[in-house]
Amino acid sequence: MSRTAVIAGQGALAPAVIAALDAPLVYALDGFAPEGVEAQPFRLERLVPFLDSLLDQDVSRVIFAGAIRRPRLDPELFDNRTAQLVPRIMMAMQSGDDGALRAVLDVFQEHGLAIASVADVAPGLIPGEGVLAGEPSAADRRDAERAALIHATLGPLDVGQGNVVAQGQCLAIETLPGTEAMLEFAARHAGLRPNPKGAKGVFFKAPKPGQDMRIDLPTLGPDSVTQAAAAGLAGIAWQAGGVILLDRDEAIRRAETAGLFLWAMPVSGI
């Protein structure tokens, strides 16, 4: 009987994915296990033996769930077979995080392991098109469309998965520090909006153009709503079918309490 393995990263996504599966095997890069999840650690320096162990346990598919940062590698820990992969992975890293992830996925697949997406195992976590809370105004919709254009333009540079736009002006772009840092920055510079009484601004999120939709999908949740409200924004817009929404009911409750809209935008509008 084939089994499923979850490579658990930090954050709330891994527990949600694990809960949607029937007795998966759960692993995490050493030092990156999410809180409250029992995960067996493994190291990239011994990636090939790890893949062999998955096959020995009849694992046929693997799901990556949660945030993983590049680990610090110890050259002394590499086994001979994994060491042969180092030049290939290091070359892929030169093209950014996306390139490095694709190289690792290729190695998994070359060992006969299929890569499943969150959409495959927990489609309810990825909202389809529609407004989930509140109602974006015409100005909000224009800001969301502007944010989507900025995101699509920056996407090939592998910068991030989100930005904030108010009254057509880009207040912040998500980079390595992450979403919370971006929203804090936008809050500090809210006074740069051309009209203090005009549209408050929109936090937009979407996968990077050309991103492998099986891994590293953008994720929103109740904390995202709280942070957007603290930044004084009108709401959150994202690409329908391309963004994970954790704890949907609580996210909607917080949005309604704060007077924010939540809008899964149609792909055609992005």
Image (cartoon, grey):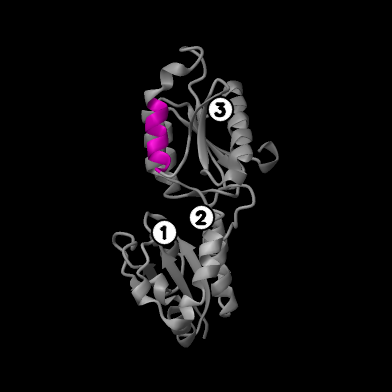
Q: Can residue 42 be seen in the rendering of this structure?
A: no
Q: Height in image: 117 above or below 185?
A: below
Q: Write down the residue under mark 1.
A: 70
Observer able to see residue 102:
yes
Direction from residue 254 to residue 94 in the image, left or right: right
Closer to the eye: label 3 or 2: 2
Tag 2: residue type? Asp
Q: CA distance from mark 3 to mark 1?
A: 38 Å
Going from N to C along the chain, the mark reached first, 3 or 2, is 2
Q: CA distance from mark 2 to mark 1?
A: 9 Å
Residue stretch in magenta:
177-187
Q: Residue 265 sits in which quadrant?
A: top right
Q: Position of residue 246 (x, y in %)?
A: 44, 50
Chain-order first, disc 3 or disc 1 = 1
Q: Quadrant of the C terminus?
A: top right
What residue is shown with label 3? 136
